[in-house]
Amino acid sequence: MNFMSDNVAGVAPSILEAMVAANEGTAPSYGADPITRRMEQRFSDLFGRTVAVFPVATGTAANALSLAQLSPPWGAIYCQGEAHIQADECGAPEMFTGGAKLVPLPGAHGKLDADTLKEALARAHKGFVHAVQPAALSLTQATEAGTVYQPAEVAALAEIAHAQGLSVHMDGARFANAVAHLGCDPAEVTWRTGVDVLSFGATKNGAMAAEAVIFFDPAKAADFAYRRKRAAHLFSKMRFLSAQLDAYLADGLWLRLAGHANAMATKLAVGLSALPGVTLAHPVEANELFVILPETMIQGLEAAGFGFYRWDGCTIRLVTAWNTDEHSVTKLLAVAANLSARGK
């Protein structure tokens, strides 16, 4: 009954099986193995074009190294104020870029809107030697509020960024949940709408520790291999990262896992929002819920053994995962309904 994060979940069985299979015999090191080659082709097939793929072990590494490729040390990287790169990565983007400045912008429900970005860029002092220079836009998909950018929203933001000479990065730690919600081709919310580089997440959705930096124009990945090595993310036994990503993409597993997590979040949202005094802080479009509850109900749920984070005051965050047990969801709703009926 742990809804604290999708990171609390274990590894999907088929991904574990792929790692065990990769353990048989020997294989060339540093990514020169057949599993890595197969995984790279899966990504190109998935996105409908030849892409450059670089596995790394953490989302922070994927984001920070991507942005280091896109921004010089004197660059400005624009993001929504609650973005993971801004709030939860301990300065890693600033360190790996050599000092680029993150510029957080306001936006409802975790999302940036086109007008806000346009106004920020108009104030950017482009060409002024005393000011950081606009270099990149980073979008989080799904957002830190559990919402999802529609393809048209990504396209509008990317068009503004590209017109001003900025590259576009997407933090896709929960990319699978976003695509499962949208029901679209992954290309329609990435390179076809203007995304240059994607941090493709798998760890939160069934992998053990595997993310990938994906360049939709391989030419933009020039020298990235050296950047990854210098950051200590070139694994000598790369096949074990690649095996996770390969199994993750095989037969649409990544979307099935995300679809289950999303469905459990939707069930929680529908059940909780029907109770008196309960409000959803944001639309529930992926696998995160931010719910405003009476304090007595929060305490009652904690006493009943449910795990979740208090976010702000009487707002809690509930996160579902690829293996969330529907019985746990049903039980939480039943306990919450009982507490509500008792005036708690």
Image (cartoon, rainbow, N blue to C red):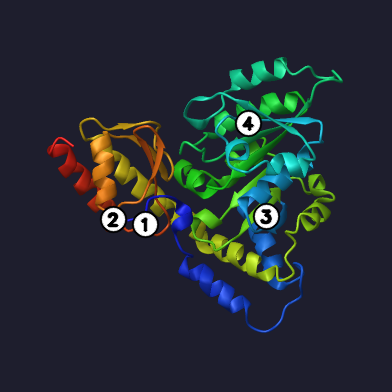
Residue type beneath disc 2: Ser
Give the distance between the C-alpha atoms of the residues marked 3 and 4, in whole angstroms. 27 Å
For disc 2, the marked residue is: 328
Give SS at disc 3: helix
Crowding around mark 2 (Cα neighbors within 10 Å: few <14, some 14 to 19, many 20+) is some
Give the distance between the C-alpha atoms of the residues marked 1 and 4, in whole angstroms. 31 Å
Task: Tell whether label 1 touches label 2 (CB within 8 Å).
Answer: yes
* Rendered location of residue 227, percent (x, y): 80, 52
Q: Quadrant of residue 134?
A: top right
Give the distance between the C-alpha atoms of the residues marked 2 and 1, in whole angstroms. 8 Å
Give SS at disc 1: loop
In this rendering, would 95 be left or right of 310?
A: right
First of labels 3, 4 by sequence position:
3
Crowding around mark 3 (Cα neighbors within 10 Å: few <14, some 14 to 19, many 20+) is some
Q: Nearer the viewer, mark 1 or mark 3?
A: 1
For disc 4, the marked residue is: 79
Does any portion of residue 165 appear in the rendered image?
yes
Quadrant of the image containing the C terminus: top left
The residue drawn where x is 49% and y is 56% is 205
* Rendered location of residue 72, percent (x, y): 82, 36
Q: Quadrant of residue 163?
A: top right
Residue in the foreground of this view, choosing between 231 and 175: 231
Q: Is residue 169 above or below residue 42?
A: above
First of labels 1, 4 by sequence position:
4
Give the distance between the C-alpha atoms of the residues marked 2 and 4, in whole angstroms. 35 Å
Give SS at disc 4: strand
Residue 324 shows which numbered tag? 1
Does any portion of residue 48 appear in the rendered image?
no
First of labels 1, 3 by sequence position:
3
